[in-house]
């Protein structure tokens, strides 16, 4: 199966989802809304935010531009924003929502072009703000949408444009994953079809215990205690 995720390629929650599908029988693509500096093994990454148009990173190897150059430009961009926009404004919610909408509408065409060329079997948007909004504007089906935390209630409740984008995305979702039953009913209020399938599950990403030093320390203690039994 060819799967295309619209996701923040640097999000640990998104990466845990994507890793599960990186099997030999699947071809996994990521349209990343941030510059993905460490792609998930076995995926092909298309960065919406890049140095040059058409720059793609495949399994950590830059095609067209290098990761180091991209990171350098990212730092320069942050520096420019810092000079032009006061810190107090950068920390404000209105600045954040403005940047969110700027990202969505700037990259919808690029995302649509990438997905149209890929022709995946399914598109899965991991998170509603930005990723889900993009999925709704791209209009590719079948569409799977996952929401986490306050995705369904915070921005849509406060901003009319976000309500429109939420309705646009939910009306096209063929499958919806939520971490609460509450959001299922809210999704239906935003035009998600009650007859479409829903999956309810916690999607906090989880931990890989073997990567934690305390895991190995406790494991050694458990083995030592077992020997005494």
Image: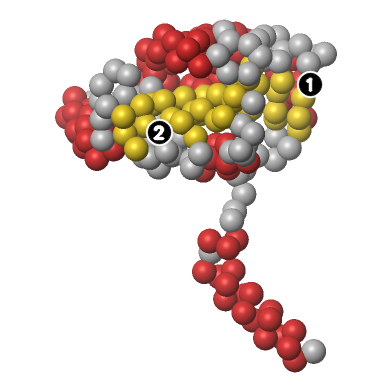
Q: Quadrant of residue 4?
A: top right
The spot of residue 120 in percent (x, y) is 58, 18
Q: Which mark is residue 197?
A: 1
Look at the numbered disc 2 and give the secondary structure of its residue.
strand
135 lies above or below 59: above
162 lies above or below 46: above
Q: In the visual, does 212 lie left or right of 50?
A: right
Please report the residue visible at 37 percent of the width from the left and 32 percent of the height from the top. 57
Q: Quadrant of residue 221?
A: bottom right
Q: Tell me which label, 2 or 1, sits earlier in the chain.
A: 2
Residue carrying label 2: 58
Name the foreground residue: 60 vs 171: 60
Residue 22 seen by the camera? yes
The spot of residue 170 in percent (x, y) is 65, 14
Residue 159 seen by the camera? no
The spot of residue 183 in percent (x, y) is 71, 26
Please report the residue visible at 32 percent of the width from the left and 19 percent of the height from the top. 54
> Of discs 2 and 1, which sits in the foreground?
2
Please report the residue visible at 70 percent of the width from the left and 30 percent of the height from the top. 178
């Amino acid at each position: 199966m060819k799967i295309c995720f619209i996701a923040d390629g640097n999000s640990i929650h998104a990466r845990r989802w994507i890793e599960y599908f990186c099997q030999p029988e699947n071809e996994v693509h990521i349209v990343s809304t941030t510059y993905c500096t460490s792609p998930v093994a076995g995926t092909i990454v298309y960065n919406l935010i890049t140095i040059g148009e058409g720059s793609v990173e495949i399994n950590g190897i830059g095609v067209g531009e290098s990761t180091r150059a991209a990171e350098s430009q990212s730092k320069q961009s942050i520096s420019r924003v810092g000079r032009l926009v006061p810190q107090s404004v950068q920390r404000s919610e209105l600045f954040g929502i403005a940047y969110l909408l700027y990202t969505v509408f700037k990259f919808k065409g690029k995302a649509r072009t990438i997905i149209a060329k890929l022709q995946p079997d399914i598109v899965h948007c991991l998170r509603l703000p930005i990723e889900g909004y993009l999925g709704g504007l791209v209009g590719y089906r079948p569409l799977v949408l996952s929401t986490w935390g306050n995705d369904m209630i915070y921005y849509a409740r406060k901003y009319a444009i976000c309500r429109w984008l939420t309705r646009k995305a939910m009306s096209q979702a063929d499958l919806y994953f939520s971490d609460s039953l509450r959001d299922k009913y809210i999704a239906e209020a935003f035009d998600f079809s009650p007859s479409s399938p829903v999956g309810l599950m916690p999607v906090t990403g989880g931990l890989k215990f073997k990567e934690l030093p305390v895991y190995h320390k406790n494991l050694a203690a458990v083995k030592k205690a077992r020997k005494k039994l």
